[in-house]
Image: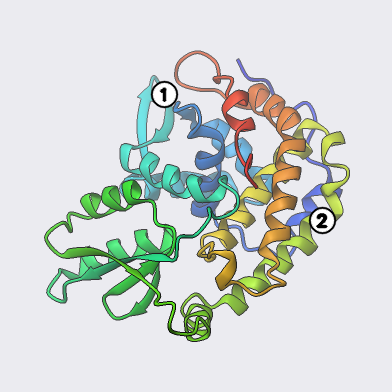
Amino acid sequence: MATPDPDPVSPRVTRLARGLKLGANSMLVTLFGDVVAPRPQAVWLGSLIRLAAPFGINDRLVRTATFRLTADDWLAATRIGRRSYYGLSEAGLQRVLHAGKRIYAGDAPEWDGRWTLVLVRGDVRATVRQRLKRELLWEGFGAIAPGVMAHPNADLASLREIIQAARAQEYVAVMEASSLEAFSLRPLQALMHQTFKLGDVADAWQALLRRFSPVAEEAAQLAPADAFFVRTLLVHEYRRVLLRDPNLPEVLLPADWPGRTARGMCSAVYGALLEASEAYLHGVVEVADGALVDAKRALRKRFTHA
């Protein structure tokens, strides 16, 4: 049985969130992706309220967000007595696992010069088109022309799942393309800069570094409640920037790309926070069946290639 918070989050640490707009829906997605996905369990609504409180999200907002996320097929609700428990739905788990491959995977693999192109038929229903585009953007694809999206290091298994989940198999063609050595790479680099708005992404990486670098050296010494807060906020903001970053190959990036430094910092800080933040979660989270599963072995594998 979880107990009341033995140590609230310190004001010094909560100041890290100053100036951020932390929505209830997106914060719960972060919590389920980082905390629940490695150990698929249903979490008591009261525990979700407790976890969200330090981020300025009250119980009413948590209740509304869980209702919406359940309606949008992110979460699955279970009722036991008078208590409601929420776990990831099958579709929600698929989404967070897809995102997790990018969030925790580290640097882009060696590039072979080939691109994966997704071509969408013009007569596809608007709802299918919108869902497909949203999921592909989360997967790191960029829209290079109307109905054409591209990725230099696409995960084909994830792409297949996305197309099937959108029920778009009859409306999507997937192709490979590669640059010809006889032509300059400069136009391609400029196209990538425009397509993925790399200037805006670089500014976002710099802002993340400014926010979290001051706490990096002391991360391993933080109290459990503070460690949980910093870990969750770090993943939340890192996810927000990374899902705008296509993780392009080195040859297509500027020499001073700040994403490299940001990834390294996030890897180090996340690892330093893991032990204490997990202790906090085991102390305050109640689940539908038994105790919160120990997932430290799986969690330590995150960012291992960053």
- Which of the pair 276/114 is nearer the observer? 114
Q: CA distance from mark 2 to mark 1?
A: 44 Å
Question: Which residue is found at the position 24% from the left and 50% from the top?
Answer: 165
Outermost front residue = 182
Q: How is the image coloured?
A: rainbow
Check residue 82 in the rendering and tell me which mark sits there, or answer none: 1
The percent coordinates of residue 66 (x first, y second) are: 43, 44
Question: Which residue is found at the position 31% from the left and 53% from the top?
Answer: 159
Question: Is 106 on the left or on the right of 71, as rendered?
Answer: right
The answer to whether 86 is drawn above or below residue 250 in the figure is above
The answer to whether 224 is drawn above or below residue 17 in the figure is above
Check residue 245 in the rendering and tell me which mark sits there, or answer none: none
The percent coordinates of residue 198 (x first, y second) are: 57, 76
Quarter location, residue 116:
bottom left
Question: Is 26 on the left or on the right of 124, as rendered?
Answer: right
- Which of the pair 28/212 is nearer the observer? 212
Quarter location, residue 294:
top right
Q: Amino acid at mark 2?
A: Ser
Query: Label 2 belongs to which residue?
Result: 213
Sequence-wise, the earlier of marks 2 and 1 is 1
Q: Secondary structure at mark 1?
A: loop
Q: Amino acid at mark 1?
A: Arg
Count neighbours of disc 1 (C-alpha within 10 A) and say few if under 14, some if 14 to 19, many if 20 or more: few
Q: Secondary structure at mark 2?
A: helix
Foreground disc of the pair 2, 1: 2
Question: Which residue is found at the position 77% from the left and 31% from the top?
Answer: 224
The percent coordinates of residue 135 (x first, y second) are: 35, 58
Count neighbours of disc 2 (C-alpha within 10 A) and say few if under 14, some if 14 to 19, many if 20 or more: few
